[in-house]
Image (tube, rainbow, N blue to C red):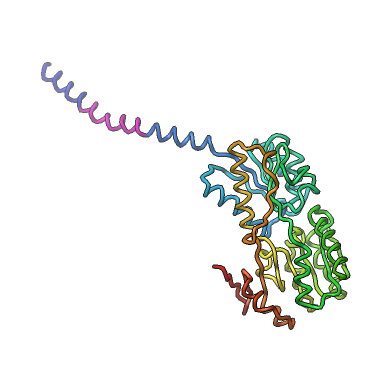
C-alpha cells in the first residue's frame, strides 16, 4: 500500500507539473484577450455616405480612411452610396441613426443635407459641399454648427471659364447641370454671372438625373463654342456621355474636376485634388472624435495652391486644333498624351 501511495503521489505531482504550463499559458492569454476586447470596444463607428460613386467622391472616401488610419484613429467604417437618389440618402441617414454610430460623414451636398436633417446630437461632417451656408448646413463659414462642420469644394468658376476663353474663341458657353442639387444650382448661378461679366452668352440645360445628361448635352451642343462642367455630381457621374457627345460635335469641354477627367474626352480640367480633400476631412473628423466641438471648427476651404491641379488632354487639343501654351503644359499636374495618363509631379 505504501508503494501504491507513493506512486499515486508521484503521478499527482507529474500531472500538476504538466498542467502548470497550461495554467500559465491561460494566465498569459487572458490579458491579451482583455486587451483585444478593449481595443474593439474603443473603435469609433463612423458612417460615410456619398451621393454617388465617381472618381472624385471615391477619392474623398479613400482619403478620409487613409488619414484616420495614419493618425492612429481606431475606427470602423460603414460605407454607403446613395446612387444619386435623395430617398436613398435619407434611408442611409436613418440606418446610421438606428446603428447609433459615433459620427457620420456626408460626401457631397445632398447626402450631407440628409444627415443634418436626421442627426441633432451626433456629429455630422460634410465634405465636397460647395456652399454649406447656402445648403442650410451651417449659418456661417467662420464657425460650425452645434453638431456639424466640414470641408467645402467651392471652385473658382470664373477663372475656369476664363481659362477656356483664353484657349478658344468663346462667344457662347454651354452648361448642363442638375436642378435638384443645391451645389449645382449655386455653381450655375456663378457661371451665369461670370459669363455676363465676360460678355459670353450662357446657354444652359438642366437635368434631374444622370440618364438625362446625354440628351441635355445634345440639346445645346450645336449652339455653343464650349461646355463647362462644374462640381455637379449628377453630371460628373455621366461625364462620359457628355464629353463623348461634345467631342463628336467638335466642342471642347472644360471641367472643374481633374479626378474624373482622366479617362474621358475633356480638353482641360482645373480643380481640386479630391483625395487631398478627403485627407483634410479626416483631420477634422479626428479633432471632433477627440472632443473638439464642431461649433469651434470653421468650414475648411481648399485654398492652398497644392490643393489645386490642372489636367490637359494633348490628344484632344491636337484633334481640335487647339494649342496650349508651353508654360501651361509644364505646370499641369496631369497630361493625356498618346492615350496615356501622365502624372508630371510623381
Query: 9 left or right of 196?
Result: left
**Toward the viewer: 133 or 123?**
133
Query: 89 left or right of 190?
Result: left
Which quarter of the picture shows residue 202?
bottom right
**Toward the viewer: 340 or 166?**
166
User: Is 256 drawn above or below residue 315 in the view shown?
Assistant: above
The percent position of residue 39, horizontal first and vertical second, equals: 49, 37
Residue 306 lies within the magenta run: no
Which quarter of the picture shows residue 138?
top right
| Quadrant placement of the C terminus | bottom right
Query: 6 left or right of 19?
Result: left
Tell me what residue is drawn at x 58 percent, y 71 percent: 344
User: Is 284 drawn above or below residue 217 in the view shown?
Assistant: above
The percent position of residue 198, horizontal first and vertical second, equals: 85, 69
| Quadrant placement of the N terminus | top left
Tell me what residue is drawn at x 80 percent, y 67 percent: 214
The percent position of residue 143, horizontal first and vertical second, equals: 72, 42
User: Is 13 drawn above or below residue 319 in the view shown?
Assistant: above
**Could you tell me what secondary structure mostly forms the magenta stretch?**
helix
Tell me what residue is drawn at x 24 percent, y 26 percent: 16
Region rendered in magenta: 14-28
The percent position of residue 305, horizontal first and vertical second, equals: 64, 61
**Toward the viewer: 238 or 259?**
259
Residue lying furthest left: 3
Tell me what residue is drawn at x 56 percent, y 50 percent: 67
Query: 97 left or right of 19?
Result: right
How many discs mark residues in the rendered view? 0
Residue lying furthest top: 1
Amino acid at each position: 500500500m505504501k508503494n501504491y501511495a507513493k506512486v499515486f503521489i508521484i503521478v499527482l505531482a507529474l500531472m500538476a507539473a504538466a498542467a502548470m504550463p497550461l495554467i500559465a499559458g491561460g494566465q498569459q492569454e487572458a490579458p491579451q484577450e482583455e486587451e483585444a476586447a478593449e481595443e474593439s470596444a474603443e473603435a469609433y463607428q463612423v458612417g460615410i455616405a456619398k451621393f454617388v460613386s465617381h472618381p472624385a467622391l471615391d477619392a474623398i472616401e479613400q482619403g478620409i480612411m487613409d488619414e484616420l488610419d495614419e493618425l492612429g484613429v481606431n475606427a470602423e467604417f460603414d460605407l454607403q452610396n446613395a446612387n444619386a437618389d435623395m430617398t436613398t440618402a435619407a434611408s442611409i441617414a436613418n440606418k446610421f441613426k438606428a446603428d447609433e454610430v459615433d459620427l457620420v460623414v456626408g460626401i457631397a451636398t445632398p447626402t450631407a443635407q440628409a444627415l443634418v436633417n436626421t442627426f441633432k446630437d451626433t456629429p455630422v461632417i460634410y465634405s465636397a459641399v460647395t456652399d454649406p451656408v447656402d445648403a442650410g448646413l451651417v449659418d456661417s463659414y467662420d464657425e460650425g454648427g452645434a453638431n456639424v462642420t466640414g470641408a467645402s469644394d467651392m471652385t473658382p468658376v470664373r477663372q475656369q471659364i476664363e481659362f477656356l476663353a483664353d484657349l478658344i474663341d468663346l462667344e457662347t458657353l454651354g452648361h448642363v447641370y442638375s436642378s435638384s442639387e443645391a451645389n449645382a444650382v449655386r455653381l450655375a448661378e456663378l457661371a451665369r454671372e461670370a459669363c455676363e461679366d465676360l460678355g459670353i452668352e450662357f446657354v444652359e440645360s438642366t437635368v434631374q438625373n444622370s440618364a438625362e445628361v446625354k440628351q441635355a448635352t445634345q440639346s445645346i451642343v450645336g449652339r455653343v463654342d464650349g461646355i463647362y462642367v462644374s462640381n455637379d455630381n449628377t453630371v460628373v457621374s455621366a461625364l462620359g456621355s457628355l464629353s463623348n457627345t461634345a467631342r463628336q460635335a467638335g466642342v471642347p469641354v472644360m471641367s472643374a474636376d481633374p479626378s474624373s477627367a482622366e479617362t474621358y474626352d475633356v480638353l482641360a480640367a482645373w480643380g481640386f485634388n479630391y483625395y487631398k480633400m478627403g485627407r483634410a476631412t479626416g483631420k477634422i473628423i479626428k479633432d471632433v472624435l477627440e472632443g473638439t466641438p464642431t461649433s469651434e471648427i470653421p468650414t475648411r476651404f481648399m485654398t492652398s495652391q497644392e490643393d489645386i491641379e490642372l489636367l490637359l488632354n494633348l490628344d484632344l487639343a491636337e484633334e481640335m486644333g487647339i494649342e496650349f501654351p508651353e508654360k501651361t503644359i509644364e505646370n499641369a499636374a496631369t497630361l493625356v498624351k498618346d492615350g496615356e495618363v501622365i502624372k508630371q509631379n510623381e
